[in-house]
């Protein structure tokens, strides 16, 4: 047995040496590309999406597409940092799902900049304090994040990417606390309380539910409360020295949160893209049907439509729409041209690679 182990370990050592040679070779090419760009943006969402899809398609071994994509995200992140250091703003504090989404998309070669509010996340990029931003836009259980949609209406920033993050909620607390059934207080972000409502009702029916600004803040409070616990990701438990009391307590195991990546980049087609717009409809029968009919006529699929009050005080609504395809595709461009002729107001937030992993 020992001889077999030694053989495998020797083979791994030899493979690691070859990997290091190839990583250095890749990094040298990345540095040369940075010099050729001459100050152009180093973050190319469409190119990175193409790389991840290509290596994911080749992942026929034991690692699987998602794990291979995560490895190559970190490789690209480290190589990108050789061209230019990047900073990315996200809704903080540290230990939130927003931080997890940021590093899932950009890798750990960027500097994360936690912000106190979604407004501050937008401002960080608008004032060039950060290169890009990551903001939550919708949750599969609790619905859309209204403040993100409101700010998209006025910002000059473009949507240049998206991140879909599986939401795994955990009950976390000090390891020497009273025990899962005896906690007096549960701290959590309001959305997380909603996502774990049934579990809490069954397992902690007497505990007081205390909504706070973020799951990281919930973890901070639980760390200072011997009779308190919190709901949040494993990352929050790690950051605040808490133990995992119960794992995956979300009511819906398919629970996902979608995040948008914002920046100044004009993103080219990646081969599988999404375009986001907002538009208004005239206040008359059939107006909404007239607005969306050009998409069907040109074979453009709508993946999402969300209505929100236009805040004009006249019962008018704005419609936030995601469509499949890139602005550069003729069918998408023709459909949008027709919509612009019918819509009293329309704004295109951008075309960007659809999330794959």
Image: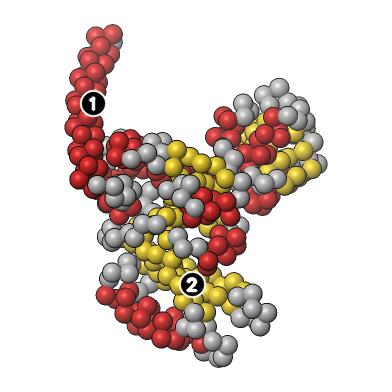
Considering depth in this image, is 31 or 251 the residue closer to the camera? 31
Residue 125 point in image, percent of width and height: 48, 52
Mark 2 and mark 1 residues within 8 Å of each other at the beta carbon: no
Q: Residue at x 58, y 30 (%)?
A: 239
Considering depth in this image, is 156 or 289 the residue closer to the camera? 156
Q: Residue at x 28, y 13 (%)?
A: 5
Q: Is residue 103 above or below residue 3?
A: below
Q: Residue at x 44, y 55 (%)?
A: 262
Q: Which residue is mark 1?
A: 20
Q: Is residue 232 above or below residue 322?
A: above
Q: Secondary structure at mark 1?
A: helix
Q: Which residue is mark 2?
A: 278
| Coloring basis for residues | secondary structure
Going from the N terminus, do you reach mark 2 or mark 1 first? 1
Residue 29 placement, left or right of 263: left
- Disc 1 crowd rating (10 Å Cα; few below 14, some 14-19, many 20+) is few
Q: Is residue 165 visible?
A: no
Q: Secondary structure at mark 2?
A: strand
């Amino acid at each position: 047995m020992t001889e077999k182990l030694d053989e495998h370990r020797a083979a791994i050592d030899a493979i690691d040496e070859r990997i290091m040679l190839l990583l250095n070779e890749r990094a040298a090419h990345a540095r040369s590309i940075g010099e050729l760009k001459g100050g152009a943006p180093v973050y190319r969402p469409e190119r990175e999406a193409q790389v991840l899809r290509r290596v994911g398609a080749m992942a026929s071994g034991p690692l699987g597409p998602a794990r291979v994509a995560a490895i190559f995200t970190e490789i690209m992140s480290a190589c990108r940092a050789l061209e230019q250091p990047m900073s990315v703003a996200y809704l903080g504090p540290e230990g939130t799902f927003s931080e997890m989404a940021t590093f899932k998309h950009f890798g750990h070669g960027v500097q994360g900049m936690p912000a106190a509010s979604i407004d501050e996340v937008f401002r960080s990029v608008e004032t060039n304090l950060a290169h890009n931003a990551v903001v939550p836009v919708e949750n599969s259980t609790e619905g859309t994040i209204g403040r993100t949609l409101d700010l998209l209406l006025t910002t000059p920033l473009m949507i240049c990417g998206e991140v879909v993050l599986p939401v795994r909620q955990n009950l976390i607390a000090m390891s020497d606390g009273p025990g899962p059934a005896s906690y007096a207080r549960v701290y959590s972000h309001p959305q997380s309380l909603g996502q774990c409502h049934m579990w809490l009702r069954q397992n902690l029916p007497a505990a007081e539910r205390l909504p706070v600004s973020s799951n990281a803040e919930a973890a901070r409070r639980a760390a200072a409360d011997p009779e308190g616990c919190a709901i949040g990701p494993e990352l929050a438990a790690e950051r605040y020295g808490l133990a995992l009391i119960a794992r995956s307590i979300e009511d819906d195991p398919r629970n996902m949160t979608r995040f948008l990546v914002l920046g100044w980049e004009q993103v080219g087609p990646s081969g599988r893209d999404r375009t986001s717009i907002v538009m208004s409809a005239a206040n008359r029968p059939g107006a909404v049907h007239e607005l969306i009919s050009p998409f069907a006529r040109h074979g453009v699929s709508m993946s999402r439509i969300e209505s929100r009050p236009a805040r004009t005080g006249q019962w008018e609504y704005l419609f936030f729409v995601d469509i499949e395809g890139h602005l550069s595709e003729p069918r998408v461009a023709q459909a949008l041209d027709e919509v612009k002729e019918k819509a009293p107001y329309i704004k295109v937030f951008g075309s960007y690679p659809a999330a794959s992993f």
